[in-house]
Amino acid sequence: MPLKFPQPPLGAATDVAVFHCPFIIDAPTAGELRVRQNVKVVVSRDGRIQAIDPNHEADKSTTANKTCVIVPGFVDCHVHAPQYKQLGTKTDVPLMEWLQKYTFPAEAAFASTAHASAVYPRLICRLLRNGTTTALYFASNHLAASLILAETCAKYGQRALVGKTCSDQLLPEDYVETTAGSLADTEVFVKSVYERHGRNGLVMPVVTPRFVPTCSLELLQGLGEIAEKYSCHIQTHAAESVDQVALVRSQHPELARDIAILASCKLLTSKTVLAHCTHLHDSEARTMAQTGAAIASCPYSNMLFSRAVLPVNRFRSLGVKIGLGTDIAGGHSASMVDSVRMAGLVSRIDGFLPRWDRSTDPREESGVQPVGDEEVVDWKTAFYLSTRGGAQALGLEVGVFEVGMRWDAVMVDLTWDEDDSADDTPRENEEDVEMKFERWICSHGGEQGVKKVWVDGKTVFARE
Ligand code: GUN
Ligand code: FE
């Protein structure tokens, strides 16, 4: 089947687009799945939903055929773009060693703009055909390659928040930055992205200290100033693994922990997204809730590198916004459907993993109990986290089908499974469709079944 990634001008520039959908499915809140039948959706030229008319008289020229449903595009809250070629490999050592042995060298190769121009389009197309309409990207330390990533997202029509990573210590010689150079390049990056794409454009800049261990205090403080000056998003990693938590404590004996250090540098705001946070204390989760900072939970890499499960329900009940991420390439998959399924699976683990020495578990300090039944994340909640939850974490008007929201959507053919393909009779009832959709999410997911993807009302991928 030919794959198509239309490039500008994307889709038709008509005043309004009208979509006739046999079924649309979304998750407005955690655990709530909404199925609407025979829906006419009107989308304005700027990509916003103007009207949603369910139970509309069935139209002969439907946008989706009867075996398809339309769902909100996935929001991937944590992707390392320059690690794409490493995906699914080299996860045999602990985090800090993994960075030094494999990951920093892989990222250092992006000093070559030719390399960036070769790799980034492939990643973006891969994510689009998996239904990821929005991604929060870590690029590399290089200004030029980071700008290429931002431009490539715009070229293919993916909604993206992109950060040039910053690190002025503990990196190999050919990859480390000077403090002044990192700050200057970050400011140029932020200004360039705003100039090219506007303040609330399809592509937005993100101030991105890699994580506390590889950033001097001066760098963190300077990045906090830049984020405040341009009121832009911020992203970094926090409380990720036992070796990382211990390193931060040894580097900063007084403040000791990521959250306190980031807060002291103006890096904890309502536009901050912190990856992982599996080793967070309750008191720190409360601080995040108060500031409006969000967590990007990456269940695959949390297993591989954190070797822990984020207590999603617990931290959500404390008021923290949570989205899901693939964490390419700390995670093994480029599909958010895999992250959805994995979020549900890992939440079933009762108690900490056996290798943990509970006496040194940082969560013991705040009296956090091992994960139990109350931590089970059902598939509808995981689907919500991958769409609306992620959108709320990033402050975006996507992830749910409501008037005023943007039409970032994915058409899924529910007959993806060969054993099901004979069954192409029109779906009559919502329960049947809900079950088939659950099967797509929980039994397979990924690229098979994704027929068409829209961002801002424009077609960005089609499988014909
Ligand atoms: N912490 C600092 N850098 C990284 C990274 O590239 N991946 C993950 N998973 N954690 C990190
Ligand atoms: Fe990461």
Image (cartoon, grey):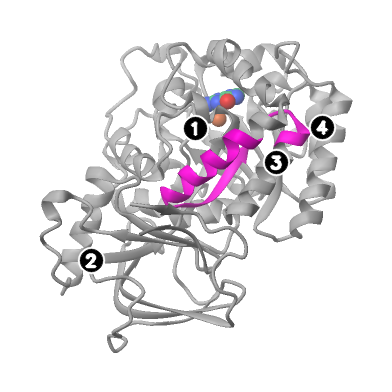
Residue under numbered circle 2: 67
Residue under numbered circle 4: 221
Circle 2 packing at 10 Å, graded few (<14), some (14-19), many (20+), is: many
Q: Comparing marks 4 and 2, which lies closer to the viewer? A: 2
Report if residue 134 lies within the magenta region.
yes
Real-space CA distance between mark 4 and mark 3, rounded to the nearest whole angstrom: 27 Å
Real-space CA distance between mark 4 and mark 2, rounded to the nearest whole angstrom: 53 Å
- Image: magenta residue range: 117-145
Q: Position of residue 243 (x, y in %)?
A: 54, 13
Residue under numbered circle 1: 328
Residue type pointed to by label 2: Thr
Q: Secondary structure at mark 2?
A: loop
Considering only vertical position in the picture, is 141 above or below 8? above
Residue type pointed to by label 1: Ile
Tell me if label 2 and label 3 are in contact, CB under 8 Å.
Answer: no
Query: Quadrant of the rendered structure where residue 208 is?
Result: top right
